[in-house]
Amino acid sequence: MAGQTDPTATAGEGLSRRRFVQQGAVGAAAAGAALATPAWAQGARRQVTRGRSVAVFGGGMAGLTAAHELAERGFQVTVYERNALGGKARSIPLAGSGTGGRKDLPGEHGFRFFPGFYHHVPNTMRRIPHLRGKTVGDHLVAASEGQFLRADGKADAGPLGIGPDPVGLLTVDGLRKTLTDMLGGTGVPPHELAYFVERLLVFLTSSDARRFGQWEKRSWWDFVGAGSRSKEYQRVLAAGLTRNLVAAKETIASTRTIGNMGEAFVFNIMGLGNDGELDRVLDLPTNEAWIDPWVHHLESLGVRFQVGWAAEHVEIRDGRVASVRVRNARRRRRTVTADWYVIAAPVERTRPLMNADVLRADPSLEGMNALKTDWMVGIQYFLTKSPGLVRGHISFLDAPWALTALTQAQFWKERRMARDYGDGRVVDVLSVDISNWDAPGVVFGKPAKQCSPTEVAVEVWEQIRRHETAGRKLDRGAIHSWMLDPGIVWNGRTGQNRNVTPLLVNTVGTWEKRPTARTRIPNLFLGGDHIQTNVDLATMEGANTSGRAAAMAILEAADSPKAPPRFWSLYELPALEPLKQIDAARFKAGQPNLLDLG
């Protein structure tokens, strides 16, 4: 009605910036809360079908999680996986490298990383029994150190992992000081560092309405004003913290995506809402510590696995899935029928299954065509001499290919590399993730996409060695062998690589294009890290959460009396809630965040 005002909006308008900054000493820090039904998993109940058979297509993180949750609740689950169980999370042994009764050298798609704000994956791991009365969760160990290394004579940043006293965080001023201290030593000019911290505070005090309504539509690069600032600011803060920490492209990723994950990492470093230590890794190769015990446990629950079979066609009849045709590598075909169907494949393999009949039944699934993938895969160097690097993850901030690394064997308490793997000479594994495949390298001057596997291995090693701290410790003569992720396929004729295991990358304005675990087809459900969850990145945590959401939707559709899977929200600092409420009113009134000075 004309002349009326929203009282909360009026309060927001009348609140001075100083008072806004000083507010916030409200409540104490608390762990992330469990949610009965997260908003992105809500939906109307579907037509009840009493059947208990479930066909899951995809044996990666999402598919195994859905199978786990459903099998525990009495459903009969069959998992169809085209390649290998575990997906991108699995180990990939270097074939033929083991001699004298030793296992093949353990390669990976990329090193494992379990930050403290992960709740869903550790919860699943603690429900998988392993040897001597332990669970798979007992194989998570702290990576107690970490480094951000520089090249060209720049001072390295110190270890990231010692958080401040949470008491000092109860005001925006306290957060400002904390963030400035955390990011100090980066070499970024002080006035630009101050500006970056202010931008972080704008996001931290932004309401959900603004995050979805404004920041989802703006790139991180633009939000932090990178285009008009120094190269150091662009490299370290705008690009480095996104590509190295969250594997996203700063120029196309939405501010909401990067901000949400940045917020999670900040609170993780501060020890707020964590499941465990700041940074965790596995104390064995991934398959030994996790994937193999998981598969054995699921088999004990009655789950059946059909490896080598991939979904090829979804048959719709009377608005429901009637069957799914699967095919193996020999092009043999079978028809799969079940009461419930879960497609838990990556987005690039899910899209071809969305045929005209599927899209007629649920037109919203066409939004997946707007989702993009990129490359982030690993290379492992098997070393005959321990490099003596830190006990944790290392970011090489001046590497054009956005490299991060971990020496793995130092964490393997139950294994000795020389005794248990390879030919007896390898003592450690330097596992490196390559996040930027489009930038020219320092040796061959070509992007990684145009380098042969050998050129990639040479280039990555040299980019690491140019970071002085690592360069002083790495001996080229200690390289026994190396393995590039086999998902990278080199074509010598065209001089180009192809990646058969790309990674979803979040881009501006695509949240609404991503499907939920529920579809409008009553017996079809989706899983994968492209599904809407509160972990808005291609991660094990996001995939696990989506698998739980698919399982919960089936439980509801089947009218099951069993308790739903458990969900956690990302931590929110209680002190910021009044400020977010004010911001919600300001956003509704078309006003900027009070801290947003442009």
Image: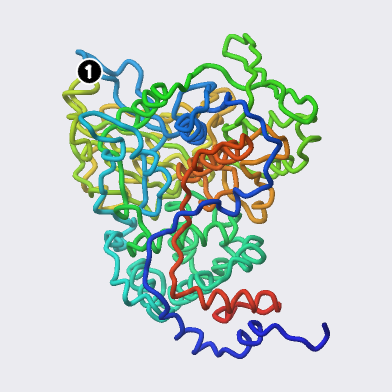
Residue 320 picture quarter: top right
Q: Secondary structure at mark 1?
A: loop
**Which x, y percent locates residue 414?**
18, 32
**Which x, y percent locates residue 464?**
33, 46
**Which x, y percent locates residue 330?**
58, 9
Up-down relation of residue 356 to residue 407 (above or below): above
Q: Which residue, given by chain and number where applicable, does mark 1 sit on?
A: 102
Residue 379 picture quarter: top left
Please indicate, yes or no, whether residue 497 appears anywhere in the rendered image.
no
Q: Kindly identify the residue that appears in the image at 43 percent across and 69 percent down.
A: 573
Up-down relation of residue 108 to residue 119 (above or below): above
Please state if 208 lies on the left or on the right of 302 as rendered.
right
Up-down relation of residue 527 to residue 186 (above or below): above
Extreme residue toward the front, this view: 561
Please state if 208 lies on the left or on the right of 23 as rendered.
right
**Which x, y percent locates residue 32?**
42, 59
Please indicate, yes or no, whether residue 287 appears anywhere in the rendered image.
yes
Q: Kindly identify the residue that appears in the image at 41 percent across and 26 percent down.
A: 298
Quadrant containing the C terminus is bottom right
Q: 366 or 274: nearer the eye?
A: 274
Quadrant containing the N terminus is bottom right
Q: Kindly identify the residue that appears in the image at 36 percent across and 63 percent down.
A: 272
Q: Kindly identify the residue that appears in the image at 23 percent across and 36 percent down.
A: 409
Assess disc 1: are there few (<14), some (14-19) or many (≥20) residues with their C-alpha within 10 Å of its C-alpha: some
Up-down relation of residue 259 to residue 190 (above or below): above
Residue 14 picture quarter: bottom right
Q: 408 or 356: nearer the eye?
A: 356
* Coloration mode: rainbow
Please state if 566 lies on the left or on the right of 496 as rendered.
left
The amino acid sitting under disc 1 is Arg
